[in-house]
Amino acid sequence: MTVTEMEQPMNTTELQSKDSTAVALTNYVQLDTRDIFQNGVRQVEIVHGEARYSLRLTRENKLILTK
């Protein structure tokens, strides 16, 4: 499943920057890991430019991202 095939909720959230000013983030996609890791899938590949990353779901239900 690709991000374009999923619903892409428009969210806005605020984060505190290092100088204590609020920074609003808009236009990000929220993915639920239940949608990514279904039907026994335990690892996915993420391509970012020329780099490839592996996102793995452990037996302890933790996520590990490696390059």
Image: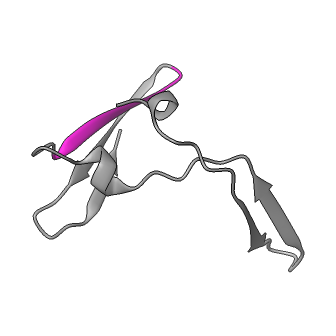
> Measured from the top left, where is residue 2 in percent x and y?
41, 29
Q: Residue at x 45, y 30 (%)?
A: 5
Q: Is residue 6 above or below residue 4?
A: below
Q: Quadrant of the C terminus?
A: top left
Q: Residue at x 45, y 51 (%)?
A: 31
In the image, 41 versus 66, the foreground residue is: 41
Q: Which residue appears farthest toward the front when viewing the image?
A: 7
Please say whether residue 4 is one of the residues in the magenta stretch: no
Colour mode of the rendering: one colour
Q: Is residue 67 above or below residue 29?
A: above
Q: How many marks?
A: 0
Q: Is residue 3 left or right of residue 55?
A: right
> Measured from the top left, where is residue 37 in percent x and y?
23, 48
Q: Residue at x 74, y 71 (%)?
A: 15
Q: Is residue 46 left or right of residue 19?
A: left
In the image, 39 versus 23, the foreground residue is: 39
In the image, 18 versus 38, the foreground residue is: 38
> Measured from the top left, where is residue 23 in percent x and y?
84, 65
Please say whether residue 45 is one of the residues in the magenta stretch: yes
Q: Which residues are magenta?
A: 42-49
Q: Quadrant of residue 64?
A: bottom left
> Measured from the top left, where is residue 12 in percent x and y?
74, 61
Q: Is residue 53 left or right of residue 8?
A: left
Q: Is residue 37 above or below residue 11?
A: above
Q: Which residue appears farthest toward the top when viewing the image?
A: 50
Q: Quadrant of the N terminus?
A: top left
Q: Main secondary structure of the magenta part?
A: strand
